[in-house]
Image (cartoon, rainbow, N blue to C red):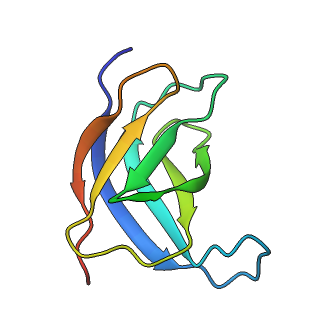
Amino acid sequence: MDPIEFSNIAVIPFDVQNFVGWRFQVIVGAGPLPIMGNSPRARLGTQILEGIQISPDGSGFGGYLRDPPDDGDKLFFNFPGFEERDTGLTFRQP
């Protein structure tokens, strides 16, 4: 797999009512991301991002968290079958 460059991360409150308990949306700029049959996996610190979707143009992805991330949490990413990698992005409290 070609190297993926990760450029930025944003965590915003998720105000849409939902039954799964998502409270924060995570948006990550990256690219190019391949569109593969298997959904990618990501975690911010120890929290697994849920509901991950790659943007249609492959320029990033988004997912959801149940709890707020901690300042300094690092973002990790992988596709199933590939090794998890540190994206080099760290969440910082605004």
**Side (left or right) of 77 relative to 54:** left
**Side (left or right) of 34 relative to 39:** left
Vertical relation: 62 (above or below) 56? below
Vertical relation: 34 (above or below) 61? above
| Quadrant showing the C terminus | bottom left
* Residue 44 location (% of width, % of height): 37, 58
Q: Residue at x 22, y 73 (%)?
A: 92
Q: Residue at x 53, y 36 (%)?
A: 40
**Side (left or right) of 80 relative to 93:** right
Vertical relation: 15 (above or below) 50? below
* Residue 90 location (% of width, % of height): 22, 60
* Residue 91 location (% of width, % of height): 27, 67
Vertical relation: 43 (above or below) 16? above
| Closer to the camera in the image, 91 or 48 | 48
Q: Residue at x 32, y 59 (%)?
A: 45
| Closer to the camera in the image, 31 or 84 | 84
Q: Residue furthest right?
A: 19
Q: Residue furthest top?
A: 1
| Quadrant showing the N terminus | top left
Q: Residue at x 60, y 55 (%)?
A: 50
